[in-house]
């Protein structure tokens, strides 16, 4: 009880202050008080992996968990980025995006936070946790989504991405990075018009962001991940019975695929990206996660290539069954195809009109020659002709 009281006295005011100040950055972005950072420090590349002299198979943007506090990779996130680059040399990978800073200002580079990191490093994690809830708050969510979506767009352009080229953009996210990834979809689609593939592992998000413009969403999850499970409890739009929210909408549209990565945990020595936890097949959890990511990306590419080589029937032209035969087309011109019943009906109307016109001249009835008179049926006995 005494320990709990000490924690409440010491961290209570800190939690209150952080909760009140967490919204400052997104409000400063919206008001235009500060300009987001767009350049990187010397020695930090805008992308790694595939060479920039030719379009890669895809651009991959990694959005790390709450441990992300500088431009360079975090310890665990950096191991995943290296594993993905090693397995997918055809990808250009970006890891410098600041998902918990609408102003793209690394937390560890701020003087006050640098001082706190040396004394109370836990506060840096707490700051990023608060930013997740700001991004999930319906009052600030549109502005936060636009800020981080613009940040990702800027970094992709600097890494060589060209809009309208059809090169896919993969948003790979971990933990709270899933909230940012789902929120950035609309802004990326509006500015780049790129196919967007979302891959998340241990995703912690509110499920409210619209995913209509996402091509597909892959959810890598484990039954031992308690943090991700809490997200499905505390956010109503993640509840299965909820008809609202982009997450359940994507599931109903068939755009959500779940991949099981049991028995990985959210954090710790058995996490999704642990290089020491081993599976029965001898791979580490890190190896399995990286393999799964590369498999998903390559499967998407194979499907796209196959669709280009073998377009579905009816795409761009009529099928054989819909094409009119050559006998029905007037010689020397392309006729508009009409069904048989419509041609028969039109022919009947033309025959009746021709017969009627033969019986009238200038609006007056005329007697038809006997040869042209309609043949009358014989009358029965006693019947008037």
Image (cartoon, helix red, strand yellow):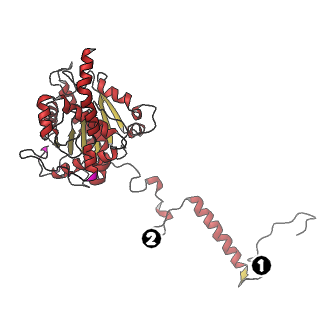
Q: Position of residue 311 (x, y in %)?
A: 34, 49
Pointers 1 and 2 in contact (C-beta within 8 Å): no
Q: Position of residue 153 (x, y in %)?
A: 23, 50
Q: Earlier in the sequence, mark 1 or mark 2?
A: 2
Image quarter (top left, top right, bottom left or bottom right) of the C terminus:
bottom right
> Which quadrant of the rendered structure holds the N terminus?
top left
**Magenta segment, which residues?**
31-56
Q: Residue at x 38, y 37 (%)?
A: 247
Foreground: 32 or 337? 32
Which element type, helix, strand or loop, lies under badge 1? Answer: loop
Which residue carries the number 1 mark?
Answer: 370
Q: Rate crowding at label 2 as few (under 14), some (14 to 19) or many (20 or more) other CA atoms within 10 Å.
A: few
Magenta stretch, main secondary structure class: loop
Q: Quadrant of residue 22?
A: top left
Which residue does the image show at 26% across and 30% down from the upper left?
13
Q: Is residue 155 among what the camera can see?
A: yes
Residue at 17% x, 39% y is 107
């Amino acid at each position: 009880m005494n320990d709990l009281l000490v924690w409440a006295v010491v961290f209570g005011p800190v939690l209150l202050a952080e909760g009140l100040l967490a919204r400052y950055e997104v409000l400063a972005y919206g008001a235009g008080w500060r300009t987001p950072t767009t350049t990187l420090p010397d020695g930090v590349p805008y992308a790694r992996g595939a060479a920039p002299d030719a379009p890669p198979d895809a651009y991959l943007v990694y959005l790390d968990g709450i441990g992300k506090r500088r431009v360079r990779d975090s310890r665990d996130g950096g191991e995943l980025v290296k594993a993905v680059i090693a397995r997918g040399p055809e990808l250009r990978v970006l890891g410098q995006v600041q998902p918990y800073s609408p102003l793209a200002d690394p937390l560890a580079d701020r003087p006050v936070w640098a001082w706190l990191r040396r004394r109370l490093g836990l506060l840096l994690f707490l700051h990023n946790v608060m930013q997740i809830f700001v991004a999930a708050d319906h009052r600030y969510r549109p502005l936060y989504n636009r800020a981080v979506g613009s940040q990702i767009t800027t970094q992709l352009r600097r890494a060589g991405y060209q809009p309208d080229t059809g090169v896919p953009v993969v948003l790979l996210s971990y933990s709270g990075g899933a909230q940012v990834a789902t929120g950035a979809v609309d802004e990326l689609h509006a500015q780049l018009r790129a196919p967007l593939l979302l891959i998340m592992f241990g995703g912690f998000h509110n499920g409210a962001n619209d995913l209509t413009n996402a091509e597909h969403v892959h959810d890598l999850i484990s039954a031992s991940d308690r943090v991700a499970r809490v997200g499905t409890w505390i956010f109503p739009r993640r509840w299965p019975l909820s008809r609202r929210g982009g997450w359940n909408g994507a599931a109903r549209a068939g755009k959500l695929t779940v991949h099981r990565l049991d028995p990985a945990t959210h954090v710790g020595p058995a996490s999704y990206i642990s290089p020491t936890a081993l599976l029965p097949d001898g791979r580490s959890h890190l190896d399995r996660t990286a393999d799964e990511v590369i498999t998903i990306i390559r499967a998407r590419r194979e499907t796209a290539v196959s669709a280009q080589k073998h377009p579905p029937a009816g795409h761009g032209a009529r099928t054989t069954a819909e094409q009119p035969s050559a006998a029905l087309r007037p010689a020397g011109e392309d006729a508009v195809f009409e069904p048989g019943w419509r041609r028969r009906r039109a022919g009947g109307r033309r025959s009746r009109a021709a017969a009627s016109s033969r019986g009238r001249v200038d609006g007056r009835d005329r007697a038809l020659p006997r040869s042209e008179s309609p043949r009358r049926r014989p009358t029965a006995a006693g019947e008037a002709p």
